[in-house]
Every structure is written in structure tokens, then in C-alpha cells.
Image (spheres, helix red, strand yellow):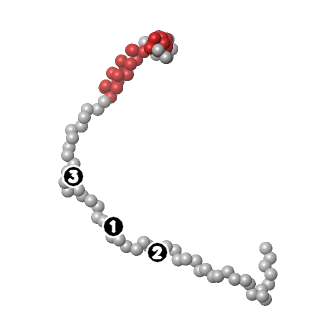
């Protein structure tokens, strides 16, 4: 797209702005003004008091993890005895 076409398209949109009823340049100026009033001043930089001698938390002593639940009582699976009654499901 050439610059002439881009200007024609941009001018057509800014000239017929239905919502704002102002030219595109007026809107840009107002936005910049609002943005300028909302900027905060730079805070005074205070050096970190702990930068040379940082306060670190105490290291956690190495220890065994707490015991988990005991393993279930596992009995080996074997064939039932020959004299066992049949299982009904």
C-alpha cells in the first residue's frame, strides 16, 4: 500500500469518527495529556541496608523425612487350598 492510499484511508476514518465526533489528532493530544498526568515521579532511591551483609534465614537442618504410612501387610497370592469352598460372586 502506498503512502497516498494509507493517508486517504486514515483521513477517511478520522474524519468520520462516529463515537468521538472529533478529529483523530484531538484525541491523541488528550490521551497524551492524561497519560502525562498519571505518571508517577521517580521515587528517591534508597540503598538496600542488607546489600553488604544480607540477613538470610536459618538453614533447615538435614534430617530424615517423616515416616510415611507403613506399607500394607502384603501376603503372597497363591492358589486356594484344595478343600476350600467355591467362591460365589
Give the residue displayed 49% in from the left and 17% down from the top: 1
In the image, is residue 19 above or below residue 65? Answer: above
The residues tagged by marks 3 and 1 sit, at their Cα atoms, a distance apart of: 23 Å
| Tag 3 residue | 51
In percent of width and height, residue 58 lies at 29, 64
- Mark 2 residue element: loop
Q: Which residue sits at x=33%, y=67%? A: 60
Crowd tier of the residue under label 3, counting other residues whose Cα lies within 10 Å: few below 14, some 14–19, many 20 or above: few
Residue 79 placement (x, y as % from top left): 73, 83
Q: What element carries label 3?
A: loop
Cα gap from disc 2 to disc 3, whole angstroms: 40 Å
Left or right of 42 on screen, residue 71: right
Q: Which of 7 and 35 is in front in this view?
A: 7
| Residue at 75% over, 87% down | 81
Task: Note whether residue 55 is visible.
Answer: yes
Give the residue pinned by disc 1: 60
Quarter of the rendering occupied by the C terminus: bottom right
The x and y percentages for residue 76 are 64, 82
Q: How far apart are marks 2 and 1 (CA)?
A: 18 Å
Q: In this view, does 89 lie above or below 44?
A: below
Q: Is residue 22 in sight in this rendering?
A: no
Helix, strand or loop under label 1: loop
- Residue contact between numbered discs 3 and 1, judged by CB atoms under 8 Å: no
How many residues crowd around disc 2 within 10 Å: few (fewer than 14), some, or many (20 or more)? Answer: few
- How packed mark 1 is, by other alpha carbons closer than 10 Å (few <14, some 14-19, many 20 or more), is few
Return the disc, 3 or 1, that comes first in the chain's sequence.
Answer: 3
Q: Which residue is drawn at 23% across and 56% down?
A: 54
What is the quadrant of residue 65 in the picture? bottom left
Residue at the spot of label 2: 67
Amino acid at each position: 500500500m502506498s503512502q497516498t492510499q494509507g493517508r486517504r484511508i486514515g483521513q477517511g476514518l478520522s474524519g468520520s469518527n462516529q463515537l468521538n465526533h472529533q478529529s483523530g489528532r484531538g484525541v491523541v493530544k488528550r490521551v497524551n495529556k492524561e497519560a502525562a498526568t498519571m505518571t508517577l515521579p521517580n521515587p528517591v532511591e534508597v540503598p538496600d541496608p542488607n546489600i553488604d551483609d544480607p540477613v538470610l534465614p536459618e538453614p533447615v537442618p538435614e534430617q530424615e523425612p517423616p515416616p510415611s504410612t507403613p506399607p500394607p501387610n502384603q501376603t503372597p497370592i497363591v492358589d486356594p487350598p484344595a478343600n476350600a469352598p467355591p467362591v460365589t460372586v
